[in-house]
């Protein structure tokens, strides 16, 4: 499973990237707002830092304007992925921009039918939002499973990018099902290393080591 980091905070991306934990980055208008940076400036900085795809989202709602914005974003760097909403206009823009050779991340997917038509429109990535489905008492993992089945049935090359991840269990479940990619905030990715038994074991080791009176250095 590839790990994308869902943030526009440069320091957080750099820390995870140094550990080999970053295969790509996803951003959106909300994350750009949180960063307090200019979208073109911060996106360029992220692209220079990360080798993998960096999703930058259009803000237009009409297809022609999405296409124009997508082309502008694609000028930032070769690893830009143009992020488009899963609307009819978004699919029109996806068809045009993917046809021009751009990577496309179709976002805000909440049904398998939406994922099916996004793949047919040429999406590089489809982003089903797990957490937001859970918020309305639906199982987001059912959607990941449905998309995986459909894509495997017909050989679609569109990659499933599990998004709106709120917990390490979301990551584990998506990996079990076979999502190609997951994107999560830095703090969630870091929690993958945490386990209470690890902490307990380390505490015991350190207590025993102290009793030996020894030093390694």
Image (cartoon, helix red, strand yellow):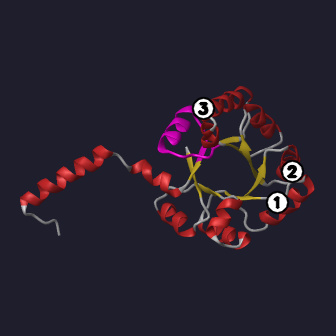
Q: Which residue is mark 1?
A: 70
Residue 173 magenta: yes
The residue that appears at 82% across and 60% down in the rendered structure is: 70
Residue 156 magenta: no
Residues shaded magenta:
161-182
x and y, in percent, of residue 36 in the image: 65, 72
Q: Secondary structure at mark 2?
A: helix
Q: Residue furthest front?
A: 136
User: Label 1 crowding class (10 Å Cα cut-off): few <14, some 14-19, many 20+?
Assistant: many
Is residue 194 depicted above or below 174 in this figure?
below
Q: Quadrant of residue 122?
A: top right
Mark 1–mark 3 distance (CA, rounded to whole Å): 32 Å
Q: Secondary structure at mark 3?
A: loop
Q: Quadrant of residue 7?
A: bottom right
Report the front residue among 135 and 130.
Answer: 135
Is residue 51 depicted above or below 125 in this figure?
below
Q: Quadrant of the C terminus?
A: bottom left
Q: Which residue is mark 2?
A: 93
Total numbered circles: 3
x and y, in percent, of residue 68 in the image: 88, 61
Whether tag 2 and tag 1 are in contact, CB under 8 A, the answer is: yes
Q: Residue furthest right?
A: 64
Earlier residue among tags 2 and 1: 1
Earlier residue among tags 1 and 3: 1
Earlier residue among tags 3 and 2: 2
Is residue 118 depicted above or below 70 in this figure?
above
User: Label 3 crowding class (10 Å Cα cut-off): few <14, some 14-19, many 20+?
Assistant: some
Q: Quadrant of the N terminus?
A: top right
Report the front residue among 55 and 167.
Answer: 167
The reply, left or right, for residue 183 in relation to residue 212 is right
The residue that appears at 29% across and 47% down in the rendered structure is: 198
Q: Which label belongs to residue 139?
A: 3
């Amino acid at each position: 499973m590839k790990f994308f980091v869902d943030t526009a905070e440069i320091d957080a991306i750099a820390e995870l990237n140094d550990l080999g934990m970053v295969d790509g980055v996803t951003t959106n208008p909300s994350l750009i707002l949180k960063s307090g940076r200019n979208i073109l400036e911060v996106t360029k900085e992220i692209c220079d830092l990360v080798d993998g795809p960096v999703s930058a989202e259009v803000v237009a709602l009409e297809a022609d304007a999405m296409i124009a914005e997508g082309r502008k974003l694609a000028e930032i760097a070769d690893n830009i992925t143009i992020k488009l909403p899963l609307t009819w206009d978004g699919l029109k823009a996806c068809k045009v921009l993917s046809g021009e050779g751009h990577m496309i991340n179709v976002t805000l997917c909440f049904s398998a039918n939406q994922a099916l038509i996004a793949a047919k429109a040429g999406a590089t990535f489809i982003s089903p939002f797990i957490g937001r489905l859970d918020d309305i008492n639906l199982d987001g993992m059912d959607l990941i499973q449905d998309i995986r089945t459909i894509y495997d049935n017909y050989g679609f090359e569109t990659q499933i990018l599990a998004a709106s991840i709120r917990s390490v269990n979301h990551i584990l479940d998506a990996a079990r099902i076979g999502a190609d990619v997951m994107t999560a905030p830095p703090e969630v990715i870091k929690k993958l290393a945490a386990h209470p038994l690890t902490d307990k074991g380390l505490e015991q080791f350190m207590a025993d080591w102290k009793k030996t009176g020894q030093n390694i250095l």
